[in-house]
Image (tube, coloured by chain):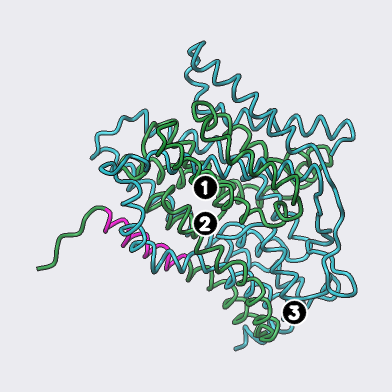
Amino acid sequence: MKAPKTYNDILHRNGRIFLALGLSVMLLVPFTIWAITGQMPDSAKLLEGFIALSILQLPGGIVEVATYGPMLGTSATYLAFVTGNLSNLKIPCAMNARQLCNTEIGTPENEVVSTLAVSASTITTVLIMGFGVVMLIPLSPLLNAPVLQPAFNWVVSALFGALGYKYFRGNLKLVIAPLAVMVIIGLLAPGFVVSTLSIAIIIGAVVSVIAAKIMFDKKWL
Amino acid sequence: MLLITRFAATTVGEVKESWWMYALAIFVALFILAGSIYFMYSAYRQSKKLNMSKDQVRKAVVSSISFSVLPSIGIFIGVITMSGLLGIPLPWIRLSVVGALHYELMAASVASTGITLATMTIENFVTIAFVMTISIMWGGLFALFFFKKYQIKVINKATSTDGKGFGKILFDAFFIGMICAYIGDAVAKIIKYEVRVIEDGAYVLDLEGNYVTENKATFVPIIVMISAMGAMAFFDWLVRKKNIKWLENFSLALSMIFGMAVAVFLGMGGIY
């Protein structure tokens, strides 16, 4: 007899259905444009572009699932891999909610908190985008105003600065090694850090985890 | 067939701003909205089964909404940036699903090297839409086929509390490393910040097909970070010491606004 499905099994089943539908909906867009216009994509350019971008996106996608999946939990991972903006919105959002609600990663409570956070964040983004499109004509001059450009250019810096305080406070020992390494890399190889931030994030995270493990084993934490 | 023939005769300008492109964008937005509402409702029901307090649920939702408003406006500005070349609906669709502005711009460049607003054809537009869509699906495909196994074999072991207890620290350390990478990025931008030039919603290429860049090295991101950090420390003090509890859900958003306001003031002083 088949073992009854656990709650997590159900989350995976529903999440996979949503993800499969999401990927199909994404694919539907270019195929619909092709069908309606009757214009095929340029196959040589398509292959060239696909290969060029996949060289970055294939390993990047795998690493993102492997690293962000645990932080997001089951449902939020499936939702986030359809809706995107992981490192600059969904992950910080889930981690902020987790800290406010005082839940631990891997617990059923955190699964709930993370799913609520990523869903609420996604709904907010969809509504703002929809509102923005409807109000495009009056909003465009405002959002494109040169005086406001710096604000939105550096929104991610503001986000990680604010969140940095929350995570650094009370975890100072965990901060020292990754902060030192990333600042040094930033100073010595600025072009590398700026142009391949996703790789820099992985380096920062790996350094941080290794340093934390050493300190944990030596009972310094 | 008649429909296809009729549209085949139109210009790319008409295609990218056509009613059916808007209909596609609305369909994608509604799909994502419906999925998010479903997941939110399921999580809410589960919170009741777990006897979680309403306060916890409210905190998770309210803080996430307030937190997401400003970055979402930033994402929408990406739609405006790309609209010069691709119209509104396609960037709206692309930035509503997995992807990001720099990825989409790169996809547009590699899919149709050297095209401009004046020279773009319907074939270019279709090719760009395909390249943008299929090249970013790897993460989703990996999650679809392997995330469950990965979670059972790796994550559950890492987060189990019956081991030495490192699981609790692991993800804090990981996220702190991620924040430090963004600090490293802000520091790097003080030394060198090569920005690809965007014209009419696409990256500009030189005669040899390389991206045209400008060095815009700047102190602004690190100042913004430190300002937001300081504001967060102030709000945290108000919450903990002055007992202004309602601020807790909004402190992050308000700190971000403060950091962004500092960027605006610096810009008004000619510092970008």
Q: Is residue B79 visible?
A: yes
Q: In this orientation, which residue lies closer to the viewer: B185 or B32?
A: B185
Q: Disc 2 is attached to a residue of which chain?
A: A
Q: On the image, numbered disc 2 is attached to which residue? A: A83
Q: Which chain is green?
A: A
Q: Amino acid at mark 2?
A: Thr
Rounded to the nearest angstrom, the CA distance separating label 3 from label 1 is 40 Å
Asked if the residue at tag 2 contacts the one at tag 1, i.e. Cβ–Cβ closer than 8 Å, the answer is: yes
Eye-nearest disc, 3 or 1:
1
Residue type for callout 3: Thr
Q: Circle 1 is placed at which residue position?
A: A90
Residue A211 belongs to the span the image colors magenta? no
Residue type beneath disc 1: Lys
Q: Colour of chain B?
A: cyan
- In front: mark 1 or mark 2? 1
Could you say where residue B80 lies in the image, as x and y percent from the top left? 73, 54
In which chain is the residue bearing label 3?
Answer: B
Q: Which residue is mark 3?
A: B10
Residue A80 percent location from the top left of the image:
48, 54
Q: Residue at coordinates 72% horizontally, 52% vertically from top-left?
A: A194
User: How far, Cα to Cα, is label 3 from label 2?
Assistant: 32 Å
Q: What residue lies at 39% left-to-right and 62% top-to-bottom?
A: B147
Q: Earlier in the sequence, mark 1 or mark 2?
A: 2
Q: Quadrant of residue B51?
A: top left
Main secondary structure of the magenta stretch: helix
Q: Secondary structure at mark 3?
A: loop
Residue B61: quarter of image: top left
Q: Are marks 3 and 1 in contact (CB under 8 Å)?
A: no
Is A30 or A113 nearer to us in this picture?
Answer: A113
> Taking A110 as reference, is A4 left or right?
left
Q: How many marks?
A: 3
Q: Which residues are magenta?
A: A8-22
